[in-house]
Image: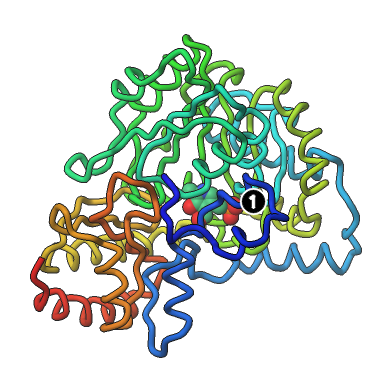
Amino acid sequence: MAAQPEDIDVDDVREPVWSPSVRALPIPGIRKMVNMAAEMDDVIHLSIGQPDFPVPEHILEAHIQALREGKTGYTMDAGLPQMLEAVAEYYSHRYDRPLEPENVLITTGATEAMYLAIAATAAPGRQFLVPDPTFPLYAPLIRMNGAEVKAIPTRAEHGHQLDPQEVIDNIGMRTFGIILNSPSNPTGTVYPKETVEAIVQEAAYRGVYVFSDEVYDHLLLDEMEYPSVLRCTSDLDHVMAVSSLSKTFSMAGLRIGWLISSQGAIKKLQRFHIFTTTVANTPAQWAGVAALRGGMECVDEMLEAYRARRDRIVELVSKTPFMTSYRPQGAFYIFPSLPPNTDATNVATRMLKETGVCVVPGDAFGDSCPNSLRISYAASMDDIERAFERIVPWMEKQDF
Ligand SMILES: Cc1ncc(COP(=O)(O)O)c(C=O)c1O
């Protein structure tokens, strides 16, 4: 994602107090749209990347109880022992593989976990393969730490599936890491087990690390076993997997995530973690124990709603002039394409101004899809219907 002139914050350039790496950080495209929408009335947001459900009651209770019982001090560096155990047991069981609490580090969301993993390994001379389009966290972090990003474009006509052979063919002498994010933000694509397995196995063979952002690991909308990298490898020496409570349990603001890797890697990252956030929020870790040990009925209810919305939005998109899409299998995004060479930033901006519907243009997620729009269905069915009642007639009047 090359920094475009309009991505540079002019105040940063005028204020040389900031380090070059901080000055090079782009203003996220998502933020630009949301800032524009904040100046307007009657906006329908199909732009939001967080669940629209309340935190399940039993989790909320555990959080409040922890606060009331005074569980408000620092925990151990790697995390609350009960939470480390809950994560290790939960994934051991889910992926049918042994994991110890020592394989886990509790972080301030998946964001901190990804920050630690990338910042601790990215360095000049090292290259990371990053699917494009992708969540706009990895490439800036990689570049900020002096390493190089090599984009692996995915294509709308293939449902934005990552071609494992293309990834493998792009592994070169400088390749140090591969970033995976399935289900994907912004495409909702879920990579099948064969893709993940082929990449993880080749990476291990070539001494390349796989950094897997699995924050949507529960938001699978079709019947399937989740193909985590943790299912695809017997040792964790070349794998760092990241997830959190944010999406699964609708707890984004409570900021609890984790990183799973070899015990050696966890020891190193634990030291780094002390210098970033010290430890994750303590009462929220108690809420996390309640979430992971409390049964998945609350998640199943949310999934049911996402599934109905996904089905409806696929239908609505297919009826919208100039939009073509595929059927996303996970997360809560769809990423339809506009006709080739259409500037989706221009379309999203005009659409917001003229219809009050806020979506995010493809170039917020990389260089390969400037004609796409990310539409989030972390919004009520009513908002989805009302948004398309505005979008469809507006699109009918366009002439791309
Ligand atoms: C792919 C992806 N990774 C990570 C995050 C951030 O997760 P957390 O809230 O756990 O930091 C998001 C949030 O939108 C995301 O979409």
Counting from the top left corner in percent of width and height, residue 310 is at 29, 60
Is residue 311 found left or right of 265 in the rendered image? left
Amino acid beneath label 1: Gly
Local crowd size for mark 1, using a 10 Å CA cut-off: few (<14), some (14–19), many (≥20): many
Residue pictured at 24% horizontal, 69% vertical: 347
Ligand 1 closer than 8 Å to the CB at disc 1? yes
Counting from the top left corner in percent of width and height, residue 242 is at 58, 39
Assign the N terminus to one quadrant of the image. top left
Give the structural element (helix, strand or loop) at label 1. Answer: helix
| Colour mapping used in the image | rainbow
Question: Would residue 278 be visible to someone looking at this image?
Answer: yes
Picture layout, residue 103 above or below residue 379: above
Counting from the top left corner in percent of width and height, residue 332 is at 38, 58
Picture layout, residue 291 above or below residue 217: below
Picture layout, residue 393 above or below residue 79: below
Is residue 310 found left or right of 272 in the rendered image? left
Query: Residue 171's image quarter?
Result: top left
Residue pictured at 51% horizontal, 54% vertical: 26
Q: Which residue is mark 1?
A: 109
Picture layout, residue 74 above or below residue 347: above
Is residue 215 found left or right of 260 in the rendered image? left
Counting from the top left corner in percent of width and height, residue 50 is at 50, 63
Name the outermost residue toward the bottom: 41
Question: Would residue 295 be visible to someone looking at this image?
Answer: no
Q: For the image shown, how many numbered marks are present on the structure? A: 1
Residue pictured at 71% horizontal, 58% vertical: 287
Assign the C terminus to one quadrant of the image. bottom left
Q: Quick one: 171 or 300, which is closer to the camera?
A: 171
Query: Residue 352's image quarter?
Result: bottom left
